[in-house]
Amino acid sequence: MARDVAIVGVGHSRYGVRSDVNIGELAWESISMALDDAGLEQRDIEYFVVSSVGGWSSEYLPAVVIGEYSGLTPKGTARVEAACASGSAAVKLAYDMVASGSVDIAMAIGLEKMNESPTPTVVEFIGRAGNYFWEFHNFGLTFPGYYALYATAYMDRYGATEEDLCLAAVKNHYYGARNPKAHFQKEVTLEKCMSSRYIAWPLKLYDCSPITDGSSAVILASGEVARELTDTPVWIEAIGHASDTANLSKRDDFTYLRAARLAAEQAYMQAGILDGYEMYKYFDVAEVHDCFTIAEVMAYEDLRFAKPGEGHKMLRDGETYIGGKIPVNLSGGLKAKGHPIGATGVGMVAELTNQLLQRVEKDRQAPIEKGRAIAHNVGGTGHYAYVTILSLDRPGR
Amino acid sequence: MSREEKVSQRELFDKQMKEFEEFVESMKDSLGLPTFPDMKSGALQWYDQRWITTRFVISVEGIKEFFDKLIDGKFVTTKCRSCGELYFPPQKDCPKCRKSDMEWVELSREGELLTYTQINVKPYSFSHYDDYIVGIVRLPEGINVTAWIRADDPSKLRIGMKMRLEIVRRKPENYITYEWVPAEE
């Protein structure tokens, strides 16, 4: 019987171009914050998982480098990779370590230092994140390019427009401007997004998340330990997970992400709440994987906040601002908070923990009434997906 | 404007990198260290003095027939002799019935455009090309093939339009590959 697992401490660095810190220093910002938040010492952490994709940065073995710098050595560790969903994979592994009884306290640390390489090199690395030979080597697809294939198909089938997509950028920059840890802390107008240059037609500069450095950390504890440590544990109620083909040409439909849909259904089943296309009614707030604006639209549908083909209408109607059906990406999302690949999933869980505990800046704090939040974290172009449900109530009680 | 007159993203990037490296070299000459202040933040950076270039060696032994036939102008793939499953890209093993007994079959050269994009910001290793269009086309056999589309403006394409596959030599690398050509206006 799996044990209940709670988040007892979170940390989150400032995201951005972090030329002021190296990899160890960047990780320490989040690790020290999470330890302070939980009231724990390094010796209390029995296992730490590091999510980092790397390639663009100098340290080949980030887990041990971070462990040494942060005083977590000699505890057991591993680096995990699930592309842009690596952070959620780290949370899942740390969760399983605790739920299984293997350890009582584990830490998931997400880190990426993408700006150690020049942009064309980073574009190259992310473009290789699919099927290398049959997609990248011969046809030079890029990460924006893969999502652009979805944008073209989605807009054609459902009559969504480039303006609709830009509305996701406008919203996420609006909240990013209110998050001091966001990469971009400036609002953008619809006109500015629409007049930005194409990166991968039909996606423009403001449809795309930036190349970001950042770190994040969460400390997980078993239910019994969590109750001793804190009066305000945030429980991990469910984690759904799925994958899809490496090669996009093996997929039938380019209007949704099958892995995200499966992961969401799985998480909803675990939480016992799967019904219909108004799933937003169970949650106070969501963080969704808006690496590109089209990804946020598909996220609404894959999470069943909207029926297939109606996600863009939620943006048109402003339903995902505070006061709408469900506020989404009040952190600024990947779009404005930034997308340090390995840190993103852990950062989502840290953000939602702070949202549920009502500890974020007032003008981007969701009203907390239901006590539940949901994180939707996609790796690659729907290659991996994790959906995590957090709750103020202990599961099953 | 002719192709030759256009400055490629690679030329621009290489020029920027050269200027940057000359700057770091000048810092190194005066300081004795490859350090420099970041242009935006002013934070001190070290410019790596060790570097590699990487190219992979990938086995195509298990699917060599694909390339042998491509040279002859044929577009083929693998079909499982045991369960009939058709694969593209071709593969040696059938995970469906767990046999490795494939036959090579020729594929249709016409299909319908499923989706497409134009790559405007290119990866470094593609940065010498003009903007290129990539599409996924569904063949009547029910499998999809990703390739470049020979067209200059994505807004002239539409989902569902007929495409024809041509075997071509990719320049400037000069290797044989395939691309889609619109088969209707």
Image (cartoon, coloured by chain):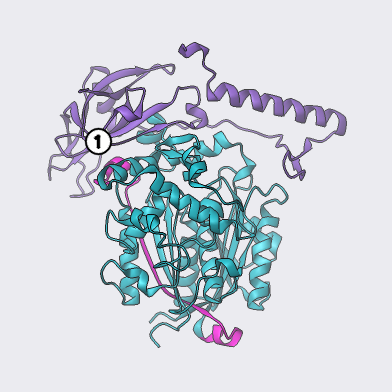
Relative to residue B133, is residue A365 depicted above or below?
A: below
Specify the chain shown as cyan: A
A204 falls in the magenta region? no
Specify the chain shown as purple: B
> In this orientation, which residue lies closer to the viewer: B129 or A284?
A284
- Which quarter of the picture shows residue A216? bottom right
Residue plotted at (76% across, 45% down):
B43
> Magenta segment, which residues?
A224-253
**Chain ID at mark 1:** B
> In this orientation, which residue lies closer to the viewer: A298 or A345?
A298
- Residue A91 placed where, x, y %? 49, 66
Relative to residue A340, is residue A143 depicted above or below?
A: above
Does residue A381 appear left or right of residue B164 in this picture?
right
> In this orientation, which residue lies closer to the viewer: B30 or B114?
B114
Crowding at dot 1, Cα within 10 Å, few <14 / some 14-19 / many 20+, comes out as some
Please give the residue where the numbered disc 1 appears in the rendered image: B159
A228 falls in the magenta region? yes
